[in-house]
Amino acid sequence: QPKFVESGGGSVQPGEPLRLSCLASGFSLDEYSIGWFRQAPGKEREGAACISYKSSTYYADAVKGRFSISRDNAKNTVYLQLTNLELEDTGVYYCAARTRLCGTSWSRGLGFGSWGQGTQVTVSS
């Protein structure tokens, strides 16, 4: 059963960094585009970043310049580096995969599967 395991979340203060990891099991990441999504309490899930299987990267406006997505296919892992965290970044962060390029529809989560359990990021002062 293909799945992801997210890790690296935690409780931090505004401005501090975190590095999230998304480890794939049961399949190889090589041919998949991977998205990081987040869901804040009481809000709908939203896309944060996406990296295509060609390693092109895409970011939501809210995180552009602060988050960085990367992949290490040899380790079957995708990373999300979070810097200059803000209170509004609080939420559960998930990763998921799809066979198509990220394109223009990635942020809505369309076509993504193998969702992980998520990792909690809490930003508070």
Image: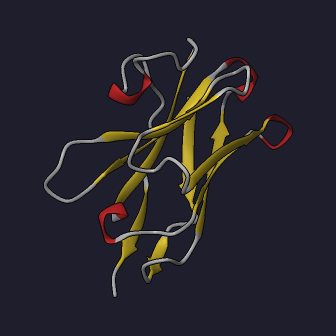
Relative to 87, residue 81 above or below = above
Its colouring scheme is secondary structure
104 to the left or right of 26: left
| Residue 51 position by quadrant | top right
Q: Residue at x 37, y 73 (%)?
A: 122
The structure residue drawn at horizontal position 42% and vertical position 67%, both measured from the top left corner, is 121
Q: Position of residue 7 (x, y in %)?
A: 57, 60
Q: Give above or below for 7 relative to 117.
A: below
Q: Residue at x 32, y 40 (%)?
A: 46
Quadrant location of the C terminus? bottom left
Q: Nearer the viewer, residue 96 or 123?
A: 123
Image quarter of the N terminus: top right
Left or right side of 62 for 22: right
Which residue is farthest left?
42
Q: Position of residue 32 (x, y in %)?
A: 64, 21
Residue 80 lies, in percent from the top left, at: 60, 52
**Residue 42 seen in render:** yes
The residue lying at 64 percent from left, 24 percent from top is 52
Residue extending farthest top:
100
Q: Can residue 117 be seen by looking at this rendering?
A: no
